[in-house]
Amino acid sequence: MSNNDKLKVKQTESKKTSFKELTIIRDTIFWIDVVCESQNENAIFARPFNDKEAFPQKLTSKKYNIKNNFHGYGGKSYKCINIKNNFYLIWIDQISKAVWFQIFKEASSNDRSQNKYLVSVQEPSQLSKSIDGNFDSSFVISEKNFLYGICEINNRDYLFSLNLKKTKQDIHRIKKFKNFAAELSSNTSANLLSWIEWDSPYMPWEKNELFFAQIDLDGEIQKINKFSNKLINSKKNVSFFQPYWISETLLVCSEDSSGWWNLLFLDVTEIESIVIKKRVKRNLIEYGAPQWVTGITYFSGTIKNLFCVAKKENSLIVEQYKDLEFVKEFSTPFTSLSDFSVFRKKVLFKGYGFDFLGILFEIDFAKKVLSNFSDQIFCDHIKDCSKPETFWFKGFEAKSTHSFLYKPLVENFKKPPLLVRAHSGPTSCFDGSYNSEVQYWTSKGFFVAEVNYGGSSGFGKAYRERLNHKWGIVDSYDCKALALELIKSNQVDRENVVIFGNSAGGLTALNCLLYGSIFTAAICKYPVVDLKDMHYNTHRFEKDYLNSLVGNYAKNRNDYINRSPIKHMYKIKKPILLFHGKKDTVISYKQTLKIQEILIQNNKYSEVIFFDNEGHGFRNLENKKVVMQKSQEFLKNVLNI
C-alpha cells in the first residue's frame, strides 16, 4: 500500500432513520431512533405500514433514554400491545430507572393529514418507582389492568406485576426465580403465562426449562407447571427458544432435542397436562439462535397466519403456516434479519445481505406474494463488493468446518496477504453479511477469511458443542487449519498471514500466535486474555459460561491458567495491535493494560490503544476510524509488502 492511500471507512451510522427495534401493530409500525446522541436521548416513533414517504411521528415527548440492560446485554427496550383497538405502549427508561406507560388510539383523517397517525388517550405515566436493577421488555397486560414483567434485582430474577391505574408504585414481586428467567409471554386474555428459566452451570442455549402459569382474577399465580416430555426434554438437556402464543391455548416455540432448533406446537388447554399438538423435525434447518439478548423473534402472527424464520444452509427462509399446517416457503436474499414482526397478514423486518445494509422490508400477504422475496426487494446494492464464498475444510479432529472466503477485488500483490477473522462469542457465527472492514481490505488487495470454528452457532447443536471444554484449542486449531489450507492451495502469501479477533475471538487470535508459526501478526479488540479473571469478575450473565467452554473451575483450574494468553505473553515475539475501551464491563481494560508493557518490550511494532469513551464493542464513529487507520499503519509496518 502506498503512503498516499486514503482511508475510506464506510459510515456505519447513517443520519437517516435507523428503524431500531421495529414492531407492527394493526396498520402502524413503531421503532426507536436517536433524538440527541450526546445526551443519550432517544424516542419511540411511528408511521403507517408500507408508507415509506410518511413523515415519522414522535410518540414519546419527554427526555428519555429508552434502553434495556437486562442480563447485561439487554434486548428490545419497549413493547406495544393492541387492546380493544388501543395501543398500549410500555418502555424502559434508564434516566428514571423505571417502567413508563402511555395509551394511544388511531388518529382521525384530519390529524393524519398533519402527519399525526396516533393520538394520546392517556398522558405518559411512570408506572414503577426507580429500581436498582434491570427490567426486561417482555411485558404482558391482563384484562384486569395488571402489567406483568420480569426484572433483575441483586443478582436474581423476579416475575412482578404493576397496576396500570397507579403511578410510581413499588413493583409487586409475584415469584422469585431460582436464577435466570426471560421471554415472558401470554395468551390474549393473559390468564396463562409462559417463560423460560435456566440455572448454573448452563447458558440458555445449552439447557433451559419451559414454564407455564395460570393467573387468578386477583393477578396472582394459581398454578405453575414445568413442561416435561419423554420425547423432548425429560432425559436430555434441551434449549427452548421464543415461546410464543398463537391462540388462547396454543403456543409455538423451537427446541433442539433433535440436534437442531425445530418447531414445537403445544396445547395448553389443561396446564397440568400439556400436549404436543405438532412437532416439526428437520435436519440442517435452525428456527432459533443463542439467546444473548432478549426479544429475538423467529415466529410471529396467529394460528390463522403464522410466519416463521429459519436458517437453511447459508440462506434464510420465511415459512407460512395456517392452522398449524405448512403453506409455503419463501426464499430470501438475506444473510441475516432482525425485528421480525407480523400483524395479521402484514410482515415487517430488517434484512441484511452481503452487498447491502439493513433495509426495511414491509409486505402484505393479503396481496399476491411471490415465493422468491428477491424479486420484490428494491435496495441500494453496494458496488464493488467481494462476495463471500462458502468453503468447508477439515478442522479439529478432521471434522468438516465452515468458513467464508472473500477474494481480493484488486491485484496489488503477486500473492495476496491473508487476513483471518475469528468471531466473538464464541457461541456466535459469521453469516456473510456486509462488513465495511472486510470490504475495505479486499479493496486493497487482501484475501479475507472468516472462520466459523467448532462451537459456532447456526450449524446444529453438535457443531456448537465441539467447543465444550476445549475453548482455546478447537477454535485456534480451526483458524490455523484454514490458513494452512489456503496456503497449500497457493491462493495466499504464506509469509503474510494475520489473524483478527474481537472479545472471545481475541483469545483465539492470541493463542494462534502462541502455538504455531503460520501467523505473522495479530490485531485484536477488547480481547479475553485471562480466563481466571473472567471466571471471578465477569458480569452475572456470563458467570457460568466458562463451565462448558473450559470446565468446572475448581476441577480445571490449571486449564484456566494455561489457556490464558496473559500467562504466555512473554513467549510471543510477533507484532500485536490491541484496542480496548475503558468502560468495558465484560472484560476489564486493566487486563490489556497488564500485557501492554510485555508486548512493547518484546516487539517494537506492537502497540496498545485505549479509548476512554468505549465499552465492550466500539460505537463512536471517530474511534472506528482510528481503529482502521492504526490497523492500516500496523500492517504496513509488519508485512513484507
Image (spheres, rainbow, N blue to C red):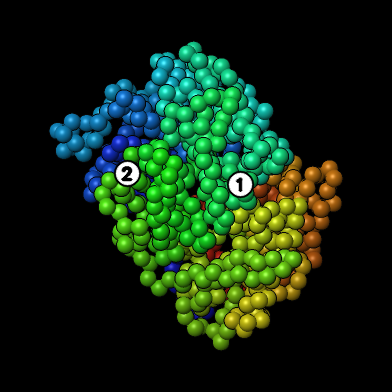
Mark 2, residues whose alpha carbon is within 10 Å: few (<14), some, or many (≥20)? many
- Residue 187 lies, with reference to residue 114, above or below; the image says above
The three-letter code of the residue at mark 2 reads Lys
Residue extending farthest top: 218
- Residue 90 lies, with reference to residue 541, above or below; the image says above
Mark 1, residues whose alpha carbon is within 10 Å: few (<14), some, or many (≥20)? many
Residue 554 position by quadrant? top right
The three-letter code of the residue at mark 1 reads Asp
Q: Residue at x 54, y 69 (%)?
A: 390
Q: Nearer the viewer, residue 95 or 544?
A: 544
Q: Residue at x 70, y 56 (%)?
A: 466
Left or right relative to 409: residue 275: right
Front label number (2 vs 1): 1
Q: Residue at x 60, y 80 (%)?
A: 492
Residue marked by disc 2: 346
Residue marked by disc 1: 256
- Residue 24 lies, with reference to residue 382, above or below; the image says above
Regarding mark 1 in the picture, which secondary structure is present there?
Answer: loop
- Disc sitting over residue 394 in the figure: none
Residue 172 position by quadrant? top right
Left or right relative to 447: residue 326: left
Q: Residue at x 16, y 34 (%)?
A: 109
- In three-dimensional space, the C-alpha distance between marks 2 and 1, rounded to whole angstroms, equals 29 Å
Q: Nearer the viewer, residue 227 or 356?
A: 227
- Image location of residue 334, percent across then percent down: 43, 59
Residue 633 position by quadrant? bottom right
Regarding mark 2 in the picture, which secondary structure is present there?
Answer: strand
- Image location of residue 469, percent across then percent down: 76, 52
Left or right relative to 270: residue 595: right
Residue extending farthest left: 110
Looking at the image, tell me whether mark 2 or mark 1 is earlier in sequence order. 1
| Residue 602 visible from this viewpoint | no
